[in-house]
Amino acid sequence: MKDKIHPEYKEARIVCACGNTVMTRSTKSEIRLEICSKCHPFFTGKQKIIDTAGMVEKFKKRYGDKKQ
C-alpha cells in the first residue's frame, strides 16, 4: 500500500439512541445510530412503532385512525 494516502483507522464508539454503546474501529471516532440490535423490534420480539419524521401521524390524518 502507498504511504500517507489512507485515512487513519482508529478506535470508534458506536452510540445508539437507546443508550447502547459498542466499541469498534473506523475512520470516524464516534458514530450515532437511531436503532440497534438491542432496541430493534425484530431482535427484541417487542412491537414498537418507529415513526420517521411524523409518517404515522401523516398516515392517520390522511386515512383516519379507524378500528374494525
Image (cartoon, rainbow, N blue to C red):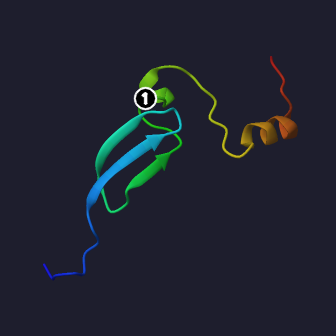
Task: Work out whether residue 36 or residue 25 is closer to the camera in this orientation and state it.
Answer: 25
Residue farthest to the left? 1
Q: Where is residue 14, by image quadrant?
A: top left
Query: What is the x, y in percent for residue 3?
Result: 16, 82
* Label 1: element kind: loop
Task: Work out whether residue 31 or residue 39 is closer to the camera in this orientation and state it.
Answer: 31
Quadrant the C terminus occupies: top right
Q: How many marks?
A: 1
Residue at figure coordinates x 15%, y 82% from the top left:
2
Q: Amino acid at mark 1?
A: Lys
Q: Where is residue 61, by image quadrant?
A: top right
On screen, 32 above or below 36?
Answer: below
Query: What residue is pinned by disc 1?
Result: 38
Query: What is the x, y in percent for residue 25?
Result: 27, 53
Residue at figure coordinates x 78%, y 39% from the top left:
59
On screen, 4 above or below 10?
Answer: below
Left-right relation of 7 to 59: left
Residue at figure coordinates x 47%, y 20% from the top left:
45
Left-right relation of 25 to 36: left
Crowdedness of circle 1 by 10 Å Cα count: few (<14), some, many (20+)? few
On screen, 39 above or below 61?
Answer: above
Left-right relation of 4 to 60: left
On screen, 36 above or below 7?
Answer: above
Quadrant the N terminus occupies: bottom left
Task: Work out whether residue 25 or residue 64 is closer to the camera in this orientation and state it.
Answer: 25
Residue at figure coordinates x 84%, y 23% from the top left:
66
